[in-house]
Image (spheres, rainbow, N blue to C red):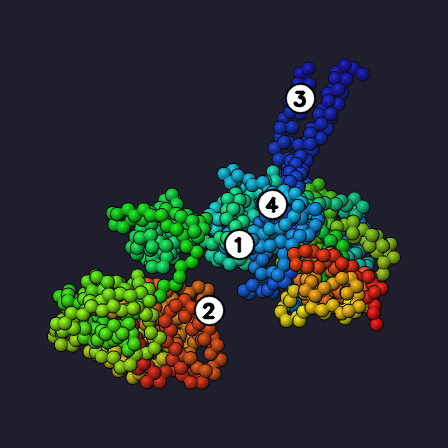
């Protein structure tokens, strides 16, 4: 063996050894990477396991809403050593008769439901036991990073060992800053269990949630989808003392609403500050612009929701708003619920100011009509009296009078100064609620002697086409021939039944009514004569806006009236256009099942009129709709029409018009 | 010396390069070596939203295939497409409906395959890959779809009687990935080292919480039946085993009257215990709430009756009662129960 050869042989050997060690080295570097992660995941699950308990329930409802609830075991998390266990409210939505918890020793123990957190959808359970329990350790929220490991743990398949699902933290501060989001598979198999980090510390408690809805079963449709939520355990532990006292926690409400439904819109002025709500009581009013909540600057609507989201009813929060240049800085105690607003009713119809008298005749508000048995009648007020002040505040227009009464509630007493001829009156009236009946024949609404001779150009009258180039729908307005702009007119938006409507019949029926009651009729047509599409609501709104702009429409008397499918549209149009529509009159159609009806609004008052047949297929649904509206304290006039559904008779139609004529009631 | 330095440099360079994408390469390798063992199976179905396809994997070099026993195989014309796109007519060698298992055979040789004897096990947290032709996405020589996840838990389906509509009564791996979809049954579940762990099951919805279950049958559960089928000892059968005993326990025999079952989930409260009956002997009292029959929680009067229907008349009956806030265990012996 020559030396060079040997050298090269040794080199080859060395190389072979090097390559061998290389491959083993690669293996060694490779395996730990995959396996260390796997080991860490298993260790994390093992670490939290003593705090994860199995829960079983007996009895209860089979369905919650439309969801068939399961009977299988669910999961809970031990939060202190005294036997308190937190779980998801979803697991108890069926209101079980008994709750059984399997403790780490394997022993089953009856548990009591102590309290519920309705905002974060959690429940607190208590078991009486001598067995030492291992409370879960919370991972500090400040350390949580999007993208870190997140392991969801439940104890539903086996009592002896937990089930795990692995993912990452997808987002923080979800559901209006109430929860973490993860892509681990979250389902009834682990609701109520912990979401842990790679060290086994608890990030949060798993719950189904939805950004839009607040019921305990909301968000369940996202199970196992890669969209799951967990309420941070730190937050849970902070609120634990209150929950241990057996107090249910509720979302904290300010009692204000805003016009913009667009969450990215700048926080506009408060559109409504419910007189029954805490913000109003703290001194905030319609028109104030909220700029800060709980120390967080608020610029957009979504920021306000994020600032409010984590807060509970009963908590105090500092709210700062701007009223012009004035800075209003108040402490508000958040409410659990805002009682529906009930419009107070004095019991009068005001004379409508006509011509240019509005500013000049500053003596008071003339009474056109006093409702029999109303607070005004009981106080002795009469038609022709001139109301001069309400609760010490001078009023000169019906709008001012309405505004003064707005923050008052039915049952409250109010002092009224009035003038009868030369005689001064001071009376007290105890306010009532709006009537649910059609008034009898009414006296004229304005003083025709005060009208000046008609002058200038008159807008088009008769059957006027309303042209909206961007819509294919046809639309007409029926304007009384004697229309004049200095006499306030109401607007009836008529939505025809499937099959459309004929112009001649429309004119024959409505022309005399419009002339008698000072109304303009707007008759939009569905693009397809046989049916209305909800997408056509936008077109109806545009057509109404066009008429309101062209003719001086009295904003207190804008109504939408429909028959059959047109009535369904009328309801939809009414509740989605509360800034415009004051009344909905539905014939032969129930209130559609809207997910949410707007709360009655002090400024944008709404009233409802519906026909009711005793033996129609729709009777029960119509009845249910009436109940829903009345539960929210909306006034509802119910017109009986006999056994079978039909359109209104001439007499009933006159009654409807009288009711619409009285919408400016105070 | 110079040469040796060069060698060392070379080794160092190799090491440096190799370290870059070690993990991706190994996972890719595992998938590459697994795919040729996967097959696509076509048979009966194709109507009523019943898919006419499923998945399977090779378990011998001579074309033996393990797959799920299902209606797809209920035809004389089963076709199998290998990973390389070759198509074969397959013969149903045998099936074990209790395990939802079937073994097919195609006429081919020198095929890559999973050795069932080399199959391994997994537990909660084990990271796994699932191979299947879910939704029939792959056709011809397209490889099977690969999904990743972890084993959520290993559990017993038989402990949850009546919860799942399947005759299978053994252990399963519950997975946290959405593996059990149309066409996925019969697919292979492997660990990160490429070792076979389980066979993907069918679509199954839990009657307990109404959610879909993703599960796979451990190879250790299937191994025995597969070898019996291969040895020709297992007769092809489609009989589904009986789930209930011929003679079961009923309330009258116990001497027990429950409160009237008026709600959809009336809790099973005892209304009356007949004097001298088995229930009286065992110490049951009116107003006791029956919460467990053996290890099974009962939620309602109906649930209690269903549980009794699964118990052979001659076995002792173990009950757990809730008396006030106390849990009380009682045993009703079989002999005392059979009163005339």
Tell us which disc is closer to us: 1 or 2: 1
Tell us which disc is closer to us: 4 or 1: 4
Q: CA distance from mark 4 to mark 3?
A: 64 Å
Which label was assigned to residue B8? 3
Tell us which disc is closer to us: 3 or 1: 1
Q: CA distance from mark 3 to mark 1?
A: 68 Å
Task: Decide if residue B34 is in sight here.
Answer: no
Q: Which residue is mark 4?
A: A82
Which structural element holds mark 3? helix
Going from the N terminus, do you reach mark 2 or mark 4 first? 4
CB atoms of marks 1 and 2 within 8 Å: no
Which label was assigned to residue A593? 2
User: Quick one: label 1, few (<14), some, or many (20+) residues within 10 Å?
Assistant: many
For the C terminus of chain A, give its image quadrant: bottom left
Q: Which residue is mark 1?
A: A116
Q: Is residue A56 left or right of residue A336?
A: right
Which structural element holds mark 4? loop
Tell us which disc is closer to us: 2 or 4: 4
Going from the N terminus, do you reach mark 1 or mark 2 first? 1
Callouts 2 and 3 in the same chain: no
CB atoms of marks 2 and 3 within 8 Å: no
Determine whether B318 is above or below B48 in the image: above
Residue toward you, B129 or A555: A555
Residue toward you, A174 or A256: A256
Q: CA distance from mark 4 to mark 1?
A: 18 Å
The quadrant holding residue B181 is bottom right
Q: Position of residue A19 (x, y in %)?
A: 71, 28
Q: Position of residue B113 (x, y in %)?
A: 77, 47
Q: Chain of mark 4?
A: A
Callouts 3 and 1 in the same chain: no
């Amino acid at each position: 063996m020559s030396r060079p050869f040997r050298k090269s042989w040794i080199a080859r050997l060395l190389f072979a050894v090097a390559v061998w060690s290389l491959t083993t080295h690669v293996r060694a570097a490779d395996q730990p990477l995959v396996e260390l992660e796997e080991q860490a995941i298993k260790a994390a699950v093992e670490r939290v396991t003593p705090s994860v308990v199995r829960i079983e329930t007996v009895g209860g409802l089979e369905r919650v809403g439309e969801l068939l609830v399961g009977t299988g075991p669910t999961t809970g998390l031990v939060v202190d050593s005294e036997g308190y266990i937190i779980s998801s409210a979803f697991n108890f939505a069926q209101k079980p008769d008994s709750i059984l918890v399997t403790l780490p020793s394997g022993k089953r123990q009856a548990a009591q439901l102590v309290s519920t957190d309705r905002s974060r959808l959690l429940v607190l359970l208590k078991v009486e036991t001598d067995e030492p329990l291992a409370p879960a350790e919370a991972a500090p929220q400040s350390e949580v990073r999007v993208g870190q490991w997140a392991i969801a743990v439940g104890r539903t398949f086996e009592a002896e060992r937990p089930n795990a699902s692995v993912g990452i933290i997808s987002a923080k501060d979800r559901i209006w800053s109430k929860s973490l989001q993860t892509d681990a598979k979250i389902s009834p198999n682990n609701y109520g269990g912990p979401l842990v980090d790679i060290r086994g510390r608890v990030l949060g408690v798993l719950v189904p949630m939805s950004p839009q809805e607040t019921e305990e079963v909301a968000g369940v449709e996202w199970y196992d989808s890669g969209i799951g939520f967990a309420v941070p355990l730190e937050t849970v532990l902070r609120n634990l003392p209150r929950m241990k006292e057996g107090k249910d926690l509720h979302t904290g409400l300010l009692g204000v609403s805003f016009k913009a439904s667009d969450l990215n819109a700048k926080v506009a002025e408060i559109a409504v500050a419910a007189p029954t709500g805490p913000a109003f009581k703290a001194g905030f009013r319609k028109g104030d612009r909220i700029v800060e909540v709980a120390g967080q600057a608020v610029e957009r609507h979504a920021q306000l929701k994020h600032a409010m989201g984590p807060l509970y009813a009963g908590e105090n929060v500092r709210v700062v708003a701007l009223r012009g240049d004035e800075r209003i800085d108040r402490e508000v105690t958040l409410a659990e619920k805002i009682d529906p607003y009930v419009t107070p009713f004095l019991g009068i119809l005001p004379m409508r100011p006509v011509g240019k008298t509005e500013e000049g005749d500053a003596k008071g508000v003339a009474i056109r009509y006093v409702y029999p048995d109303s607070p005004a009648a009981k106080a002795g007020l009469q038609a022709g009296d001139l109301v001069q002040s309400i609760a010490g505040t001078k009023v000169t227009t019906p709008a001012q009078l309405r505004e003064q009464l707005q923050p008052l509630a039915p049952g409250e007493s109010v002092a009224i100064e009035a003038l009868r001829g030369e005689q001064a009156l001071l009376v007290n009236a105890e306010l009532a609620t709006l009537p649910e009946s059609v008034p009898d024949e009414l006296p004229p609404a304005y003083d025709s002697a005060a009208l000046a001779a008609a002058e200038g150009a008159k807008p088009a009258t008769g059957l006027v086409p309303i042209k909206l180039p961007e819509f294919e729908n046809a639309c007409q307005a029926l304007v009384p021939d004697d229309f004049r702009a200095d006499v306030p007119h109401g607007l009836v938006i008529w939505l025809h039944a499937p099959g459309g409507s004929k112009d001649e019949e429309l004119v024959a029926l409505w022309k005399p009514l419009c002339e008698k009651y000072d109304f303009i009729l707007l008759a939009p047509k569905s693009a397809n004569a046989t049916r209305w599409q909800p997408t056509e609501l936008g077109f109806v709104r545009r057509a109404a806006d066009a008429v309101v702009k062209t003719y001086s429409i009295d904003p207190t008397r804008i109504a939408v009236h429909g028959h059959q499918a047109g009535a369904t549209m009328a309801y939809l149009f009414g509740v989605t256009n509360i800034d415009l529509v004051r009344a909905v009159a539905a014939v032969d159609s129930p209130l559609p099942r809207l997910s949410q009806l707007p709360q009655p609004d002090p400024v944008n008052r709404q009233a409802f009129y519906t026909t009711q047949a005793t033996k129609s297929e729709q009777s029960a649904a119509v009845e249910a709709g009436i109940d829903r509206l009345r539960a929210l304290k909306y006034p509802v006039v119910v017109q009986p029409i006999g056994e079978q559904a039909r359109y209104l008779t001439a007499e009933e139609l006159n009654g409807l018009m009288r009711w619409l004529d009285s919408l400016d009631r105070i | 010396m110079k040469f040796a330095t060069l060698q060392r440099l070379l080794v160092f360079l190799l090491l440096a390069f190799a370290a870059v994408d070690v993990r991706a390469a190994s996972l890719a390798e595992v998938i590459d070596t697994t795919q040729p063992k996967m097959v696509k199976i076509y048979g009966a179905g194709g109507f009523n939203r019943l898919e006419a396809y499923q998945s399977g994997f090779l378990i011998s070099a001579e074309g033996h295939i393990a797959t799920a026993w299902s209606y797809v195989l209920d035809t004389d014309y089963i076709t199998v497409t290998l990973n390389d796109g070759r198509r074969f007519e397959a013969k149903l060698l045998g099936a074990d409906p209790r395990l939802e298992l079937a073994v097919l055979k195609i006429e081919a040789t020198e095929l890559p395959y999973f050795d069932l004897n080399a199959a391994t096990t997994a537990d909660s947290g084990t990271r796994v890959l699932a191979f299947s032709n879910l939704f029939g996405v792959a056709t011809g020589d397209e490889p099977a779809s690969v999904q990743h996840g972890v084993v959520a838990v290993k559990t017993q389906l038989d402990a949850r009687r009546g919860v799942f509509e399947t005759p299978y009564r053994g252990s399963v791996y519950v997975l946290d990935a959405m593996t059990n979809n149309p066409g996925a049954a019969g697919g292979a579940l492997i660990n990160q080292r490429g070792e076979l762990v389980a066979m993907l099951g069918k679509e199954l919805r839990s009657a307990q919480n109404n959610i879909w279950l993703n599960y796979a049958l451990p190879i250790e559960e299937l191994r025995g039946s597969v070898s019996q089928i291969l040895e020709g000892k297992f007769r092809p059968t489609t009989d589904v085993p009986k789930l209930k005993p011929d003679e079961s326990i009923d309330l009258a025999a116990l001497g027990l009257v429950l409160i009237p079952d008026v709600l959809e989930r009336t809790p099973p409260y005892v209304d009356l215990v007949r004097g001298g009956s088995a229930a009286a002997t065992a110490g049951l009292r009116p107003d006791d709430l029956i919460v467990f029959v053996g290890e099974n929680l009962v939620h309602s009067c109906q649930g209690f009756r269903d549980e009794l229907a699964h118990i052979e008349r001659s076995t002792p009956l173990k009950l757990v009662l809730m008396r006030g806030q106390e849990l009380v265990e009682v045993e009703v012996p079989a002999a005392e129960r059979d009163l005339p």
